[in-house]
């Protein structure tokens, strides 16, 4: 039995800690949600910042909420190369040994010594969805996509637990390589 899941293409974005949010936007500042994301409790915000690397600046990059314990910047490889850094492919939250950048907001700047990653491609599944698909949290699977540029993405991390909803997360480089849009689906291969 095949298990199909919708694909969510992830553009460059960042998650801020409360301290960095306040440094960039002002003391006591709170995020202003504009759109709920598919993952429960996650949302896109009005707030945008500039990301400054050694070579270039990415202007107006969207903040996603809610705030996190540690600031994390998620770029596609193309974005990282554009600003002159070698961001490693990592699971979200695994920030040790990653490069840093400068963030510029309307009320200040933050110089980070780490926090930039290329997100490891992954599939979110609730416990019931994971059971239906025959996988469990932390499994590594492949995802097959159809179309003129159809291909198989290997090394896809399963992220399953309460607070997860069925969705494959690929970045814009990966989506462009396969000619995908946000209404695309992938088939889970074990």
Image (spheres, grey):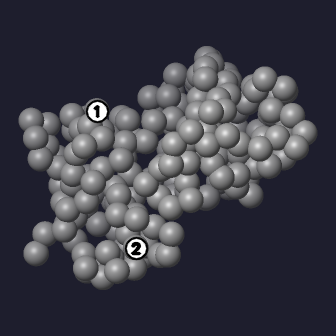
Q: Percent from the top left, x then y, of residue 8?
A: 36, 47
**Residue 74 visible, this orientation:** no
Residue at the spot 26% in from the left edge and 37% down from the top edge: 181
* Percent of width and height locating residue 38: 43, 54
- Neighbourhood count class around disc 2 (C-alpha, 10 Å): few under 14, some 14–19, many 20 upward: some
- Residue under circle 1? 176
**Which of the 4 quarters of the picture holds residue 172?**
top left
Q: Do tag 2 and tag 1 residues touch (Cβ < 8 Å)?
A: no
Looking at this rendering, what residue extends furthest in the right direction? 27
Q: Could you say which quadrant of the image residue 107 lies in?
A: top right
Q: Tell me if I can see residue 186 in this picture.
A: yes
**Above-or-below relation of 6 to 60:** below
* Residue lying at 62% horizontally and 33% vertically, measured from the top left: 46
In the foreground, 160 or 77: 160
Reading the image, the residue beneath label 2 is 126
Q: Quadrant of the N terminus?
A: bottom left
């Amino acid at each position: 039995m095949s298990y199909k899941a919708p694909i969510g293409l992830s553009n460059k974005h960042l998650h801020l800690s409360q301290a960095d949010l306040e440094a960039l936007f002002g003391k006591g500042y709170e995020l202003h949600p504009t759109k709920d994301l598919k993952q429960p409790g996650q949302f896109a915000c009005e707030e945008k910042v500039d990301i400054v690397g050694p070579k270039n600046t990415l202007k107006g990059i969207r903040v996603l909420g809610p705030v996190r314990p540690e600031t994390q910047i998620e770029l596609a490889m193309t974005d990282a190369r554009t600003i002159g850094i070698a961001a490693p492919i990592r699971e979200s939250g695994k920030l040790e040994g990653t490069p840093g950048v400068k963030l510029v907001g309307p009320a200040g700047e933050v110089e980070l010594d780490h926090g930039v990653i290329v997100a490891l491609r992954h599939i979110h599944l609730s416990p019931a969805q994971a059971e239906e698909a025959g996988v469990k949290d932390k499994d590594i699977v492949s995802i097959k996509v159809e179309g003129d540029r159809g291909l198989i993405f290997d090394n896809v991390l399963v992220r399953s637990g309460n607070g997860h909803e069925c969705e494959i997360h690929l970045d814009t480089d990966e989506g462009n390589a396969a000619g995908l849009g946000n209404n695309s689906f992938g088939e889970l291969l074990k």
